Amino acid sequence: MQDSRPNANIWGNIITCAEIAIGIYEIVGANHKGIMMPKKMAEEMLPQNVIDLAEKDGENLCFVDDLSSSIIADELIEQGIVTNPEFIAKQDALKQLDDADIDTGFETFNEIDFKLEIDKSGEFER
């Protein structure tokens, strides 16, 4: 019988594993990082299209891609299942990285246009 420990076939060599709620784990492995939770709990709180993104591991579902992990984390926080302030702060920080309205202070440039400008000036030739 399978136990509730993370399966190395999915995660690879486990680097960190933290229980963020009863039976729910945040895992970082050599192959994947994400959230593992009981299948029954996931089926009660998540839409089927999100569940379909998970890798099945016995009685658990493993959400190993960034999108599904983020959806799961948000739902767990919203429903009050996860109350760990460090986990919540980390999720908030990740959301800010994706928020286009937050100005990082760094200007981006298009490398192709930049190279063309250098070539036009004649100062840099290969």
Image (cartoon, rainbow, N blue to C red):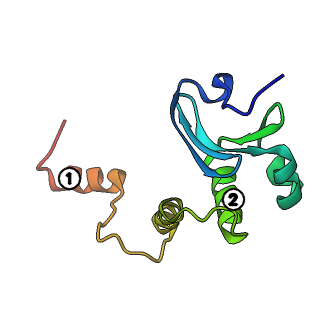
Using the image, determine if residue 30 lies above or below residue 111: above
Please give the residue where the numbered disc 1 appears in the rendered image: 118
User: Would residue 16 be seen by someone viewing this image from the given angle?
Assistant: yes
Q: Position of residue 31 (x, y in %)?
A: 56, 29
Between the C-alphas of marks 1 and 2, the distance is 44 Å
Residue 20 percent coordinates (x, y): 60, 52
- The answer to whether 49 appears left or right of 86 in the picture is right
Query: Label 2 neighbourhood size at 10 Å, few (<14), some (14-19), many (20+)?
Result: few
| Residue 45 x/y as whole percent | 83, 60
Nearest to N terminus: mark 1 or mark 2? 2
**For residue 48, side relative to residue 77 (left or right):** right
Q: Quadrant of residue 53?
A: top right
On the image, which quarter does residue 10 sit in?
A: top right
Q: Which residue is mark 2?
A: 71
Q: Amino acid at mark 1?
A: Ile
Nearest the viewer among 30 and 15 is 15
Viewer-side residue, 35 vs 38: 38
Residue 21 percent coordinates (x, y): 65, 54
Residue 52 seen by the camera: no
In screen coordinates, is 79 left or right of 15? right
Residue at 63 percent of width and 57 percent of height: 70
46 and 102: which one is in front? 46
Quadrant in which the C terminus appears: top left
Mark 1 lies on a secondary structure that is: helix
Determine the residue positioned at 24% across, 57% down: 117
Q: Secondary structure at mark 2?
A: helix
Report the amino acid beneath label 2.
Answer: Ile
